[in-house]
Amino acid sequence: MNFLSSQEILLLTSDGPSKFTASNVLTTEDLLPIVESALGGFFDTSKDYSLINFENLVFSRIRPEGVKEASSRIKKAMLSQIEKRTPISVSKMPDGRYLIDDGNSTVFCLYMSGFRVFPCKVSEQK
């Protein structure tokens, strides 16, 4: 799995402008412990799961009240005030992407917070 961006960015360095692509320097294995640690603050990752890139996820619905509730639950779980959330429930679609069965609002909130990969429990095709 590769969740590193191949997008080239221009960095200003003391030596002048330099083009940089994260995937040329870092590997998924370099970043996986960081991603899993950050996600582990909210998700219960003690059971089997797959990390899935955001661009491979398809929302089945999105509700404003659900987003507000998810935001509150994320904060409480990160502060250990409630139990951690199980991985996002997804079903594999015929085109290879994954339909979010449960966790649409959670994915939306975490995406808006900068997350681009999510621990998911994958079920068979729908």
Image (cartoon, rainbow, N blue to C red):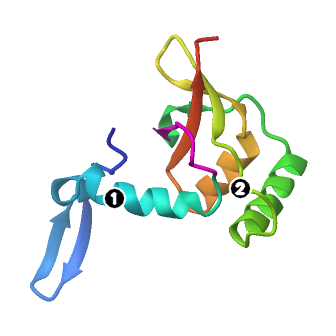
The answer, for residue 7, to whether it is visible in the render is no
Left or right of 5 in this view: 78: right
The numbered mark, 2 or 1, whose residue comes first in the sequence reads 1
Residue at 38% x, 59% y is: 33
Q: Which residues are magenta?
A: 44-52
What residue would you read off at disc 1?
A: 31
Q: Is residue 49 magenta?
A: yes
Secondary structure beneath disc 1? helix
Q: Residues within 10 Å of mark 1 (few under 14, many from 20)?
A: few
Instruction: Give, as a three-letter code, the residue at label 2.
Output: Lys
Q: Main secondary structure of the magenta part?
A: loop
Q: Is residue 115 left or right of residue 10?
A: right
* Above or below, comparing residue 20 to residue 126 in the picture: below
Three-letter code, disc 1: Leu
Local packing at callout 2 (Cα closer than 10 Å; few below 14, some 14-19, many 20+) is: some
Q: Relative to 72, is 69 above or below?
A: above
The x and y percentages for residue 30 are 27, 58
User: Looking at the image, which residue is at 20% across and 63% down?
Assistant: 20
Q: Nearer the viewer, residue 66 or 30?
A: 30
Left or right of residue 108, residue 47 in this image: left
Count of numbered marks:
2
Work out which residue is located at the far bottom of the displayed protein and give it.
14
Q: Residue at x 78, y 39 (%)?
A: 62
Judging by the rendered image, the residue that carries numbered circle 2 is 84
